[in-house]
Image (cartoon, rainbow, N blue to C red):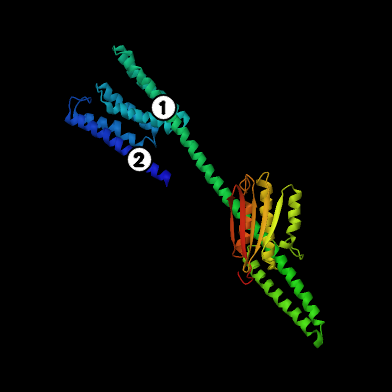
Amino acid sequence: MGARLRERTARWAEWIIVSLLLGSALYEIWASPDGGWPGSPGVSTLLAVAIILPVLFRRRFPLGVLLVVLVASGVQYAYGGNAFQPWFAFVLAFYAVAAHSERRRAVLGGIIGASAIVAVDAGKLLAGDAFGEVVPAWFFVAGVWCFGRWVRSRRFQTERLLERTVVLEREREEKARAAVAEERARIARELHDVVAHSVSVMVVQAQAAQRLTGDEQANLRQQTLNSIETTGRQALVEMRRLLGVLRHTETDLSLSPQPGLDDLEDLIGQVRDAELPVELRVEGEAAPLPPGVDLSAYRIVQEALTNTLKHAGPAKARVTIRYRNDEVELEITDDGTGTGRGGGSGQGLIGMRERVAVYGGVLESGRHDGGYLVRARLPLDASQP
C-alpha cells in the first residue's frame, strides 16, 4: 500500500508540473507575444506541446523522452527562443534518464545531454557571453545526473532490503510453523506413552482383581476396581487430547512412564551440575496430578531452565511450584541479563506455549525485575479438553 501510494503521488506530481509548465508556456505564447517563444502562436504551441508533454512518459521511456525534448528544444532555440520551459523540461528528462535507466543507457543519455548543453553554450561563449554566466550550468546539469544515479541506487537498495525482509519474514513464519508441528508431534508421542502406561496399569490391576475371591477380599477388590476406573478415565481424557494434537510420526514410541514433578530434584541436580544455581520452592500441599499435566509441568520447567542456561548468562534461577485446588502454577525466574531467548529461534517458548494450550492453561513470559520470568498455570480438572 505504501509503494502504491508513493507511485500515485509521483504521478499526480508529474501531471501538476507538466500542467504548470504547459500552462505558463501557452500563456506566454498567446497572452504575451513578446515572451521567449518565437514565431507564430500556432507553431510555438506545437513546439511547446512537443517539448513539455513527453515529460509525462519520462519514467517509462527516459532516453526517448530526452531525445524528443532535445530535438524540439533545439528547433525552438534555432528560431531564437529563450523561454524557461524547455530548459526545465530538459532538466526533468535528464534527471529521469539517470534515475530510471540502466547504466549503459544512463551514460549514453548523460553524454547526449551534456554534448547538447556544451554545443549551445559554446556558441554563447563565442558570441561574447560571460564565462561565469555560462559554465555554472554545466556543473548544475552534472549534479542533476549524479543525483539521479544516487536516487536509483538508493531505490534499488531499498527494494532489495524490502525483498530480503519479506524473505526473512517468510522463513521466520515457516520455522515457527515447523517448530509448532515438531513440538506437537513430541507432545503426541509423550501423551501416547502416558496413555499406554495407564492402559498397562489397568490391565495389571484387572488381572489382579480377577484373582481376588471371597467376601473377606471384597473391599480390596472394590479398591482395585475403583483404581481401574480412575486410571481409565484419565487415559480416555489423555487419549482425547492425543487425537487433537497434530502428529507426524509413529516412531520411537515407548511404554515406559514419562517424568513428572516428582523427578524435579534430579532435573535440578543436572542443572546445578551445569553450574547454574537453582532454588526449588513448593507452595501448597503437593497432590498427585493427572499424568499429562504432570508431564507437561515437568517439560515446561525443563525448557525454562534450559533457556536460562543458554541465554541468561551468569545467573541464579528459582523454580516455584504452587499447588492449588483447581490448578498447578509453575514459576521459573532468573536474575540474568539475557532476554530468555537471546539469539535463539524461540522454539523453547513455542514448545511451552503448545503444552499449556493442550490443557487450556495460561503462559506468561518476559523480562521481570531485572531478570526473566516464565509463569505457567495448568488446570487440574482432568475432564477439561
Q: Is residue 10 left or right of residue 294?
A: left
Query: Which numbered dot is residue 216?
Result: none
Q: Indicate the amino acid at tag 1.
A: Trp
- Depth check: 253 or 227 in front? 227
Q: Position of residue 67 (x, y in %)?
A: 36, 28
Please tell me how crowded label 1 is: few (under 14), some (14-19), or many (20+) other residues with Cα within 10 Å. many
Residue corresponding to mark 2: 11
- Depth check: 136 or 358 in front? 358
Residue sitting at 30 percent across and 30 percent down?
Answer: 51
Q: Position of residue 50 (x, y in %)?
A: 29, 32
Residue sitting at 42 percent across and 45 percent down?
Answer: 2
Residue sitting at 33 percent across and 34 percent down?
Answer: 55
Q: Is residue 227 above or below residue 130?
A: below
Quadrant position of the C terminus in the picture: bottom right
Instruction: Residue 355: tell me if it is visible.
Output: yes
Q: Is residue 292 above or below residue 62?
A: below
Residue corresponding to mark 1: 145
Please tell me how crowded label 2 is: few (under 14), some (14-19), or many (20+) other residues with Cα within 10 Å. some
Q: Indicate the amino acid at tag 2.
A: Arg
Instruction: Residue 178: tell me if it is visible.
Output: no
Whole-angstrom CA distance, mark 2 to mark 1, is 21 Å
Q: Pick whichever of labels 2 and 1 is earlier in the sequence.
A: 2
Dot 1 lies on which element? Answer: helix
Q: Position of residue 137 (x, y in %)?
A: 35, 21
Dot 2 lies on which element? Answer: helix
Which picture quadrant has residue 86?
A: top left
